[in-house]
Image (cartoon, rainbow, N blue to C red):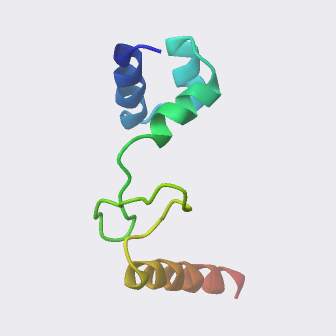
């Protein structure tokens, strides 16, 4: 896959187009789309800090424990009120 195709995939995804539609536009498999997008710079969903990864270890989703606790506590509050 060329760098132009990768740039186009990232641009389409940033514009809100899904994996399946991007795959049909670019002409590659959905797995290839997933691989290209997983290599992008990842950020913490709570504070937006850039995440650093250690090779051989599981990928982090949050930058620190405080962000992780905040995310899950907010999610717990939302689901708790939905069931009541």
Q: Residue at x 51, y 14 (%)?
A: 25
Dividing the image into 4 quarters, which one contains the C terminus? Answer: bottom right
Q: Nearer the viewer, residue 53 or 66?
A: 53
- Residue at the spot 56% in from the left edge and 11% down from the top edge: 27
In the rendering, at what x and y percent does residue 17 appear?
A: 47, 31
Which is more toward the observer, 59 or 55? 55
- Residue 18 visible (yes or no): no
Lateral position of residue 11 relative to residue 32, left or right:
left
Vertical placement of 10 versus 41: above or below? above
What's the residue at 49%, 42% (across, down)?
A: 38
In the current view of this chain or complex, which residue is farthest to the front?
A: 56
Whether residue 50 is situated above or below residue 35 in the rendered picture: below
Residue 78, compared with residue 41, is above or below; it is: below
Residue 4: image location, x then y, percent: 34, 15
Q: Residue furthest right?
A: 83
In the shown orientation, is residue 40 left or right of residue 33?
left
The residue under the point 47% across, 15% down is: 1
**81 on left or right of 9:** right
Is residue 45 in view from this perspective?
A: yes
**Figure quadrant of residue 16:** top left
Total tally of numbered discs in the picture: 0
Q: Where does the image place residue 51, in percent across and percent down from the top left?
A: 35, 61
Does residue 60 sit above or below 80 in this rendering? above
Residue 60 in the image: state x and y as whole percent.
48, 64
């Amino acid at each position: 896959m060329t760098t132009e195709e990768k740039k186009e995939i990232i641009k389409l995804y940033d514009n809100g187009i899904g994996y399946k539609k991007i795959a049909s536009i670019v002409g590659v498999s959905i797995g290839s789309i997933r691989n290209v997008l997983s290599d992008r710079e990842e950020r913490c969903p709570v504070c937006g800090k850039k995440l650093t990864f250690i090779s051989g270890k599981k990928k982090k989703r949050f930058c620190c424990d405080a962000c992780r606790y905040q995310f899950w506590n907010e999610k717990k509050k939302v689901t708790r009120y939905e069931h009541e």
